[in-house]
Image (tube, rainbow, N blue to C red):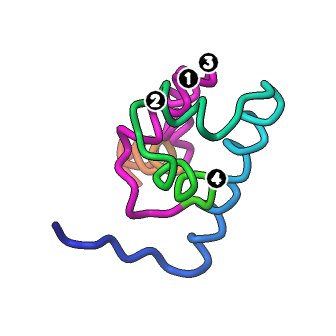
Amino acid sequence: MKQQIVLPKFNQLLGQMGENIKLARKRRKLTAVQVSERAGIARSTLYLIEKGDASVSLGAYFNVLRVLGLQNDFLKLADDDEFGRKLQDLELLGK
């Protein structure tokens, strides 16, 4: 499998997401072992998720969010496509 390359400035976004996941786990007073077992992943994978590692599968991220009760947050990804709508509006207006 080809490793994904993420530019450094975007790695910060992944790192923030991982930190958000870690904070959500701690707010629920769940241990890393509890979450990793319930998500069906290795403890080391949860560690990578909480660091925002780009090499972890999207399915693993989803399962952790599911365990935390945040699975509907997945629906927010690319939900508000402001740039895409502007491009579409320009095309519709013939500009």
The span shown in magenta is 53-82
Which label belongs to residue 39? 2
Report, in whole angstroms, how far the alpha carbon at label 4 lies from the one at label 1. Answer: 15 Å
In magenta stretch: residue 61: yes
- What residue sits right under mark 4 in the picture? 18
Residue drawn at point x = 43 percent, y = 45 percent: 42
Asked if the residue under mark 3 is in contact with the one under mark 1, i.e. CB atoms within 8 Å, the reply is yes
Left or right: 51, with 48 as reference point: right
Asked if the residue under mark 1 is in contact with the one under mark 4, i.e. CB atoms within 8 Å, the reply is no
For badge 3, the amino acid type reads Gly
Report, in whole angstroms, how far the alpha carbon at label 2 lies from the one at label 4. Answer: 15 Å
Report, in whole angstroms, how far the alpha carbon at label 2 lies from the one at label 1. Answer: 6 Å
Element class at badge 4: helix
* Earlier-in-chain disc, 2 versus 4: 4
- What residue sits right under mark 3 in the picture? 69
* Earlier-in-chain disc, 4 versus 3: 4
Q: Nearer the viewer, residue 44 or 59?
A: 44
For badge 1, the amino acid type reads Val
Q: Count neighbours of disc 4 (C-alpha within 10 A) and say few if under 14, some if 14 to 19, many if 20 or more.
A: many
Which one is closest to the eye, mark 1 or mark 3? 1
